Amino acid sequence: MNYNILTYGIYLPIIALIMIKVGWMFYTHGEVFLLHLYKQDNTIVKPINNLLLIGYYLTNLGYAIITLAYWDKVHNLTEMLNTLSEHLGNIIIGLAVLHYNNVLCLNYLVKSKKVNQYIKSTH
């Protein structure tokens, strides 16, 4: 039995489901967050949210494909479960790190914009 093909057959649907489900959740809930940050300015929120979604999908698709290219040969069921849990866990942790970085960057940009507006209004 070829465990590599079985592992790919399990990995690809799971990673596709995670990418689509999490991406859609980030997109819908992120729009509310962006609307709050940009004071309900929908003209700037929609394009930013679309760019974040596209970047999310491209990053995850690239990582999933590169991950497949560098897998070691899987010889038994134990190695298959270890490989799946390791690679799926890495992607989930990577998603969390990217998400929090995006939130922090957007929050910083909005706060610096407010500071700059305050400085301009006082002079």
Image: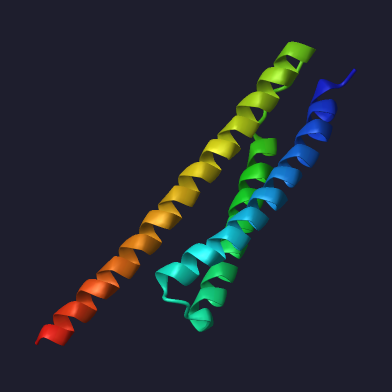
Residue 74: x, y in percent? 74, 19
Give residue 38's position: percent from left, percent from top. Answer: 42, 74
Residue 23, how many percent across, how many down? 64, 54
Q: Is residue 96 above or below residue 103?
A: above
Q: Can see residue 76?
A: no
Quadrant showing the N terminus:
top right
**Residue at 61% across, 26% down:** 86
Residue at 61% over, 64% down: 54
Residue at 44% x, 56% y: name it.
Answer: 102
Of 71 and 34, which appears nearest the observer?
34
Residue 97's place in the image compared with 33, above or below, is: above
25 vs 12, left or right, is: left
Q: Specify whether residue 121 is in view.
A: yes
Judge by depth and name the residue closer to the eye, 62 or 57: 57
Q: In the picture, residue 63 is in which quadrant?
A: top right
Residue reaching furthest to the left: 123
On screen, residue 55 versus residue 118, left or right, reads right
Residue 94 relative to residue 61: left or right: left
Towards the viewer: 76 or 99: 99
15 over 117 or under it: above or below: above
- In the displayed structure image, the side of residue 85 where residue 102 appears, left or right: left
Tell me which residue sits at (48%, 63%) in the image: 33
Q: How is the image coloured?
A: rainbow
